[in-house]
Amino acid sequence: MVLHIKKVAVAGPNGNTGPTVVKTLVASGFDVTAVTRSLAKTRDILGPEIDIIEVDYLSQHSLVSALRGIDAVVVCGVGMLPEQTNLIDAAIAAGVRRFLPASLDTDISNPVLRSFPFAQNKTIVQEYLKSRESVISHTSIRTGPLLDYVLSLGAIINMREHSMTRFDDGEKKFSTATIQTASKAVAAVLRMGKEAENRDFRVHDIVTSQNELLKWGKEVVPDAEWTVTPANTEDMAKKVVEASKVDPESRMVDIMFKALAIFGKEFNSVFEEANNEVLGIGMIGESEVKEMLRSFAGAVQSSAGERDAAIINKLSSSGNEE
Ligand SMILES: NC(=O)c1ccc[n+]([C@@H]2O[C@H](COP(=O)([O-])OP(=O)(O)OC[C@H]3O[C@@H](n4cnc5c(N)ncnc54)[C@H](OP(=O)(O)O)[C@@H]3O)[C@@H](O)[C@H]2O)c1
């Protein structure tokens, strides 16, 4: 007998991806409980309709109580060690059947990428889950950069300032997906049975390049003066080693590693064998991406976005303008 997943707990439900994941799961017919360290903050963001449980990630009792009766846990939070491994232990104790660790990210199957700081906690969590496959199954979703998230930061292309830090010749192709598509993939894998257990899925909306996005960006905002500054990924790979020695936790180091993971010449950033079809997710084209670019052209930049845009501008090697 196939036991369908119905009750889903979403941990970290109030950040960059959580609210869309929660709404998509509810719209797909799942019973969703948001698991958070702050009920008040999460209530403000998710509204009155969603069940919310406040937990202490360092208390096993608190986590197990929150997860009783839950079929699957979806994590929408970054890092989360030891919180995420505590959550896995509690999920097992509570009888949860499927665990989706924090993913919606770069494909980290490449061993070099797994050594990058942003992937290290995720690798530890993945290994932890592999060692417990006899008692709980797991599924991860790889999306490449989340297009609307990176556009909101002005990374890859900055529609607000009409600028781009272009990595190498700008031709490197990469897979990318929106937060909505990532969330639909979460719902799709939870609807699946054994075929979704203990594996990764790759989903993308489009395969594009910085030059293509620049061309579309210029068409969307034709009267703007665009500034394109070059950045060399080989130089950046050297600089990040030095920067890591000074402050390994800095946002600059994080952004450099993430940019290298997408644009570094040695990494394949295109999902050659994406799982869109089995997940029932189509792809988008030029007109949809242009619509998205247009919506970010007039968007107000968050303070985090301003900070990151300034960091991304600094990645350019010489400041030469086009
Ligand atoms: N590919 C991309 O471009 C991209 C972009 C963004 C995110 N992502 C991925 O999406 C996933 C979710 O990331 P996100 O940006 O949505 O997360 P986030 O906004 O950074 O965090 C979401 C929530 O997680 C909880 N959380 C954070 N740190 C925690 C900790 N140490 N212990 C317990 N809870 C913690 C917090 O909620 P409470 O305080 O309420 O508990 C936080 O509001 C990650 O795997 C991330 O890598 C990918």
Image (spheres, helix red, strand yellow):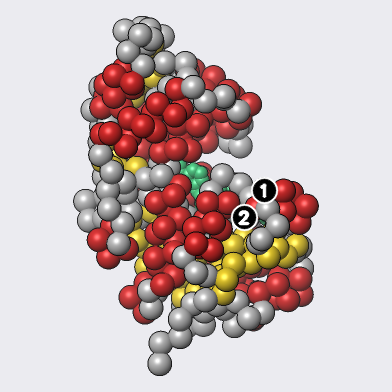
Q: Is residue 307 left or right of residue 209?
A: right
The percent coordinates of residue 11 (x first, y second) are 62, 60
SS of the residue under disc 2:
loop
User: Where is mark 1, residue-wise?
Assistant: 45
Q: How many marks?
A: 2
Callout 2 amino acid: Pro
* Mark 2 CB within 8 Å of ligand 1: yes
The percent coordinates of residue 81 (x first, y second) are 63, 57
Please state which of residues 41 and 249 is positioned toward the viewer in this rendering: 41
The Cα atoms of the two marked residues, 2 and 1, are separated by: 9 Å
Examine the rendered structure and indicate whether residue 146 appears above or below residue 63.
above
Examine the rendered structure and indicate whether residue 279 appears above or below residue 249.
below
The percent coordinates of residue 176 (x first, y second) are 34, 42
Question: Which residue sits at x=38%, y=74%?
Answer: 192
Q: Are marks 2 and 1 in contact (CB under 8 Å)?
A: yes
Residue 110 visible in image: no
Question: Which residue sits at x=41%, y=44%?
Answer: 178
Crowd class of label 1 (few under 14; some 14 to 19; many from 20; radius 10 Å): some
Crowd class of label 2 (few under 14; some 14 to 19; many from 20; radius 10 Å): many
Callout 1 amino acid: Ile
Question: Which residue sits at x=27%, y=65%?
Answer: 278
Which label belongs to residue 13? 2
- The residue sitting at the bottom extreme is 1
Question: Which residue sits at x=59%, y=62%?
Answer: 10
Please state which of residues 198 and 187 is positioned toward the viewer in this rendering: 187
**Res 214 quadrant in image:** top left
Q: Is residue 18 left or right of residue 126?
A: right
Task: Return the disc, 2 or 1, that comes first in the chain's sequence.
Answer: 2
